[in-house]
Amino acid sequence: MHLLQFQLQRSIALRFLLLAALAFTAMLSPAMAAKEEKVLEVDAPAKVKPGTTGLLKAAGKGMRYFLRVPKRYDPNRGARLIVFLHGSSMNGLDYLRSFEAKKWCEDDILCCPNGENGNDPFGQCNFGFESGPLVADVTEEVQKALKVTITYVGGHSQGAFLTYSVILNYPDLYRGAFPMAGDCWMQNEPNLWEDKPDVLKKQREIPIAVIHGQADPVVAYSQGEHAYDCFRAMGWTKLRLFAPKNLNHMFMLAPIDEAIEWLDAMNGRIDPKLSVLSAKWSREGEWGWIGAAGRASKSGTMLARAAEDAATKAVPAITTALKGKPADWIPKWIEFWRIYGDTAAAKPLVTTYLAARATQRDAAAKLFNEAKATSAPARKTKPTKSSKNSATNPPTPTRAISPGSGFRKRSDPSRAARKWNGFLTRGGRTVRRFQKIDRIIGSAGTGRCHPLTDTLAGAEIPGQTPPPVNQNRQPSAATHRWDLPAAKREKSPDPRVPFSALRASHQTEREKPMSYELKKDQRGQFIFNLKAANGEVILSSESYAQKASAEAGIASVRTNGPNDASYERKTSSANQPYFVLKAQNGQVIGRSEMYSSTTARDSGIKSVQTNCTSTAVKDLT
């Protein structure tokens, strides 16, 4: 009897533990958190009834998205709209159900688009080259169909990268952002709009809550820090970094609710809680948040005044610091700018700084290019006919770095044609400037940057590809990137190492059986093809609005091409095999032609793997 009782108790205990484990696993994974009930497809947002979720296809460009209207939605009062962008190989419904499981945003309209790369809206989807404009179209469609009081956009992993793009390119649509586990790369960094002060002013009004776990094994924490520093360097005052020490890549463990509450505070939407939050922020020295919340709130006059008083007290110390060495005052200035930049007390200093920065921009870019040209290491090659009679074969001069092309209005008819390299084409090669040019030359000459100025004074290198998302690289306390000594740069596989990509090749075309051909298509967009020795095209790129982005795409082929896992073997609707080359973040770099058999397709993949590292580029632009 005792034995039977013991076995029964053990059986019950094991079942309880199993159920608990399954529940905990579901809590961690967005995919497992999704409910199984059928989601009906409707043809208009207005047809989604309160308390239900519908699957829609945007009227404009046709992006699929899931829309949940809250139970208590009142068309007279309206509701907040949360647009959330899913991670790699996921879908919008997975994340929508995760929000519901965590009871986040229960009274909000939830809009979760599906990446356009994927056939099953309930299966694996990925965002791609046209995702930025498509997400903007979806957002506008929902805003017009329902009464929306305010719109925030967020994203996880792949969706976080896209989040930075949509807020910078469409600042009129969003009043807050909360990207988690992402980064803003060289095509969508805020400094690319420096020549468009009106647009930059709109962008700076968007509060950004950067979320990134320090234990993230998928997207390195240093990438979240880099994104945060990019916005700090451009004077963002409504900026916050949520960096839980033990948080990994798990979306459902992230402080999403806290981040949204902070966005509400920056937009003056939490008056009852504002006094409590402000008391906490004052102890942390975050007077910028207090001032922003006070100015946005109907009852925040005293808070705004307190922030002004704090700025007045901080001005003498930073004024003294600005007289010192750039390596000492730059980190202090950037943090001062973030906290006090919107105050009247700081305005004279900010105005002086921006004027000096604008004056020195062109000179800084020129000196950087000169330093870059003299710092590029020489490459030893076999003697060729062209170099046989000379002791040295000087490298081809590298092209000058130019500022970004800036922002195009959404009314621009060419908007749909703009292609997205990495996550969006935005100007290409740029120098992140700051006030003292000597630090730029110093960084170029030594290969090591200041802990903060590597973000402020580094450069986007022609031909440099954005780094892969899945990095094993550990965050560095000294610098977020380009932190390898010069002696190790040559052999480093890390595409962030700058000057190895700048070497001019001394090989002749005879020594390069394959080459890249860079040209313009009929629409004036930049494309490239990878050609075999017989001239046959074996890989074709997407279209790019900027030449520098096409060059970065070529570099990305060189980086990802040798890896077999980077190829997706597919079959067309006409039952013809072909393949797609993707970066480690899931973004498409190039596509093959259609093949007559899978054997021929696999041979094409092997040909690209073997020869994609070619440095020969035939420029036909």
Image (cartoon, helix red, strand yellow):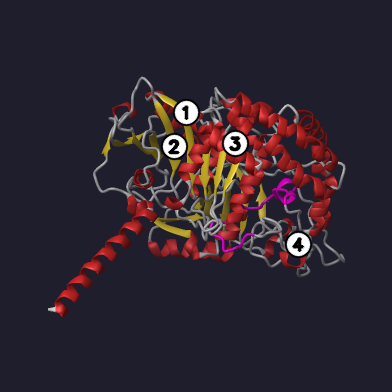
Residue denoted by label 4: 506
Select label 4 or label 1 by which is in front: 1
Select label 2 or label 4 by which is in front: 2
Residue that sits furthest to the top in the current view = 76
* Circle 1 SS class: strand
Select label 3 or label 2 by which is in front: 2
Report how far apart the C-alphas of labels 2 and 4 lie in the structure.
Answer: 50 Å
Q: Main secondary structure of the magenta part?
A: loop
Residue denoted by label 2: 83
* Left or right: 243 in relation to 512: left
**Foreground residue among 195 and 290:** 290
* Left or right: 278 in relation to 596: right
Q: Which mark is residue 524?
A: 3
Which of disc 4 and disc 2 is earlier in sequence? 2
Select label 1 or label 3 by which is in front: 1
* Circle 2 SS class: strand
Residue denoted by label 1: 150
Image marks 3 and 4: residues in contact by CB distance under 8 Å: no
- Magenta segment: 452-475
Q: Is residue 158 visible?
A: yes
**Foreground residue among 512 and 422:** 422
Which of disc 1 and disc 2 is earlier in sequence? 2
Report how far apart the C-alphas of labels 4 and 1 lie in the structure.
Answer: 57 Å
Which of disc 4 and disc 3 is earlier in sequence? 4
Image marks 1 and 3: residues in contact by CB distance under 8 Å: no
Circle 3 packing at 10 Å, graded few (<14), some (14-19), many (20+), is few
Circle 1 packing at 10 Å, graded few (<14), some (14-19), many (20+), is some
User: How far from the left and from the top, in percent, is residue 408?
Assistant: 60, 30
Q: Quadrant of the C terminus?
A: top right
Image marks 2 and 4: residues in contact by CB distance under 8 Å: no
Q: Is residue 407 visible?
A: no
